[in-house]
Image (cartoon, rainbow, N blue to C red):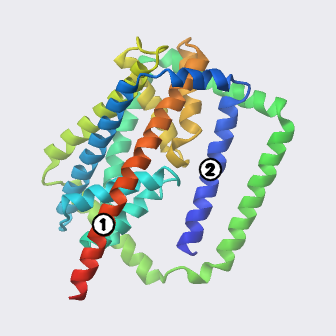
């Protein structure tokens, strides 16, 4: 299938899922009051949040460079950073296509083969998933009763949605079915354009080799330390959003940690920038802790929204630097 067509389908499906969760989360909620609360956010903590996000992106770039060098390739720091930021930028609009962007951009500026960079990103994501899962297990062990409530409350909400919005559900099922049928038709129509099996096999082999090499990192201690610092900074980003809102400025660092790992499940789902899914999970978490649901939604909108805004800003700044590097490499190859 044409890659552009596949990306469009992935984006539409991700948006569809995100919109469903947004509706479940925000229907019958005081939207005006939620945004009035956000308007009173402390700008100082929001600026600190942006600084922390930039440091996280930089550390992710350095961590990625360690994996790439372990695979036998090199890349300039500026190229690694540009690719990392642009990957985040694209992920803000599309579900997980930013990883493809990272592979494409680093190839154009540093000639790291796509299959190799893809393998390094798999390793990069595996470690993030390991930390996320360990964090979730820790939270579950410490907060089992509250999380049991979330489970029952989520099921109750879904059942209420079906019983109170039968017409909406019917339309969702119809649209979902139509999208599925269209996807099947497109797959059948464009199957002949899929790359040759030999190329696919070569790609899989190269990716597997990269993953196998990267398991034994030469700079594992640095890699692991950077990974821990990244996740600590992510908790701090949540904490600064709590400090920014008058209603949550007395909440604990521990609560920010719980929010990160439970809300992180929303980021792991195939929606652009975790839209809808993170809002939904954070709302359930606030309810489980007997906190004001309106405050939970204000925090969810602020934390998700400020990350989105800063990611767009950093992406727009990074893009011209990437273009300069790409054209320089292209020019040198022609000489």
As drawn, the residue found furthest toward the bottom would be 335
- Residues packed near mark 2 inside 10 Å, few (<14), some (14 to 19) or many (20 plus): many
Residue assigned mark 1:
106
Q: Which residue is rendered at x = 60% and y = 63% of the image? A: 8
The residue lying toward the viewer, choosing from 197 and 246, is 246
The residue lying toward the viewer, choosing from 78 and 175, is 78
- Tell me if residue 269 comes above or below residue 102 in the rendering: above
As drawn, the residue found furthest toward the right would be 167
Q: Which mark is residue 249?
A: none
Q: Quadrant of residue 292?
A: top right
Where is residue 42 drawn, in percent x and y?
41, 22
Q: Quadrant of residue 108?
A: bottom left
Q: Which residue is rendered at x = 56% and y = 47% of the image? A: 271
Left or right for 263, reference 85: right
Where is residue 307 drawn, in percent x and y?
43, 39
Q: Which residue is rendered at x = 49% and y = 36% of the image? A: 304
Q: Which residue is rendered at x = 56% and y = 11% of the image? A: 290
- Tell me if residue 199 comes above or below residue 155 in the rendering: below
Residue 149 shows in this picture: no
Where is residue 43 drawn, in percent x and y?
40, 26
- Residues packed near mark 1 inside 10 Å, few (<14), some (14 to 19) or many (20 plus): many
Where is residue 297 drawn, in percent x and y?
57, 25
Residue at mark 1 to residue at mark 2: CA–CA distance: 27 Å
1 or 2: tag closer to the N-terminus: 2
Q: Which mark is residue 15?
A: 2
Where, quadrant-wise, is the C terminus in this rendering? bottom left
Q: Quadrant of residue 212?
A: bottom left
Where, quadrant-wise, is the N terminus in this rendering? bottom right
> In what element is the residue under mark 2?
helix
Left or right for 199, reference 8: left
């Amino acid at each position: 299938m044409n890659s552009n067509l596949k990306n469009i389908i992935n984006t539409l499906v991700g948006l569809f899922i995100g919109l469903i969760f947004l509706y479940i989360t925000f229907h019958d909620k005081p939207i005006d009051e939620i945004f009035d609360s956000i308007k009173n956010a402390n700008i100082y903590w929001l600026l600190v949040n942006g600084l922390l996000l930039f440091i996280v992106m930089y550390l992710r770039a350095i961590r990625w460079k360690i994996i790439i060098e372990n695979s036998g390739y090199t890349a300039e720091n500026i190229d690694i950073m540009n690719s990392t930021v642009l990957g985040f930028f694209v992920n803000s609009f599309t579900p997980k296509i930013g990883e493809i962007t990272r592979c494409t951009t680093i190839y154009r500026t540093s000639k790291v083969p796509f299959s190799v960079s893809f393998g390094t990103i798999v390793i990069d994501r595996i470690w993030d998933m390991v930390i996320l899962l360990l964090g979730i297990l820790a939270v579950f062990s410490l907060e089992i009763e509250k999380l049991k409530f979330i489970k029952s409350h989520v099921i109750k909400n879904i059942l209420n949605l079906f019983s109170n919005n039968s017409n909406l559900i019917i339309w969702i099922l119809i649209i979902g079915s139509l999208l599925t049928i269209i996807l099947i038709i497109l797959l059948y129509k464009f199957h002949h354009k899929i790359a040759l099996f030999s190329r696919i096999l070569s790609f899989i082999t190269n990716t597997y080799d990269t993953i196998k090499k990267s398991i034994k990192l030469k700079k594992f201690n640095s890699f692991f330390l950077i990974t821990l610092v990244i996740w600590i900074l992510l908790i701090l980003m949540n904490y600064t959003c709590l400090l920014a809102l008058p209603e949550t400025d007395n909440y604990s660092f521990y609560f920010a940690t719980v929010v990160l790992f439970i809300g992180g499940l929303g980021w792991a789902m195939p929606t652009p920038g975790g839209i809808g899914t993170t809002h939904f999970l954070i709302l359930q978490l606030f309810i489980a802790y007997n906190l004001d649901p309106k405050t939970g939604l204000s925090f969810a909108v602020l934390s998700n929204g400020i990350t989105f805004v800063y990611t767009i800003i950093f992406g727009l700044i990074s893009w011209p630097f990437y273009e300069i590097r790409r054209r320089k490499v292209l020019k040198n190859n022609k000489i």
